[in-house]
Amino acid sequence: MNCNPPEQSVIAPHKIIGGSQNGKYFALVWELPSIKLLHQTEIHSSEKEAIEEAKNWISSNATSQDSN
């Protein structure tokens, strides 16, 4: 079966997954490989805007430092 998944973007070590509910769009930022939810964007009128907000959030808030 061929399904079209929501837009996804990987900014190592993060994964952005866009989604929608009732015609409103948002994006989730996940930390990899722990699969920990770090951030959910505000509601947007398009998935592209939500993905862009998530990318900006990663740039501003996430670090690539090891937690060792």
Image: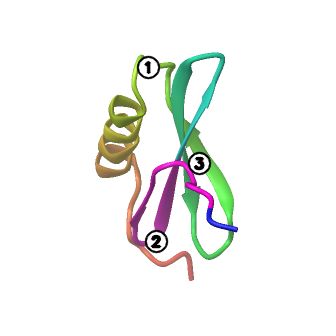
Closer to the camera, 31 or 22?
22
Specify few, some or many for label 3: CA neighbours under 10 Å numbering under 14, 14-19, or 20 or more.
some
Specify few, some or many for label 2: CA neighbours under 10 Å numbering under 14, 14-19, or 20 or more.
some
Q: Earlier in the sequence, mark 1 or mark 3?
A: 3
In the displayed structure image, the side of residue 7 where residue 5 appears, left or right: right
Q: What whole-number distance in Å separates the C-alpha atoms at marks 2 and 1?
A: 24 Å
Q: Earlier in the sequence, mark 2 or mark 3?
A: 2
| SS under mark 2 | loop
Mark count: 3
Image coordinates of residue 51 in percent, x first then y, are 39, 41
Q: Which residue is mark 3?
A: 38
Q: What whole-number distance in Å separates the C-alpha atoms at marks 1 and 3?
A: 18 Å
Q: Which residue is mark 2?
A: 13
For residue 56: magenta? no
Quadrant the N terminus occupies = bottom right
Quadrant the C terminus occupies = bottom right
Q: Amino acid at mark 2?
A: Pro
Q: Which residue is mark 1?
A: 44
Image coordinates of residue 7 in percent, x first then y, are 46, 50
Mark in the foreground, 2 or 1: 1
Q: Amino acid at mark 3?
A: Leu
Specify few, some or many for label 1: CA neighbours under 10 Å numbering under 14, 14-19, or 20 or more.
some
- Residue at 31% of width from left, 39% of height from top? 52
| SS under mark 1 | loop
Q: Amino acid at mark 1?
A: His
Span highlighted in magenta in the image = 3-17
Vertical comparison of 62 with 26: above or below: below
Image coordinates of residue 32 in percent, x first then y, are 58, 71
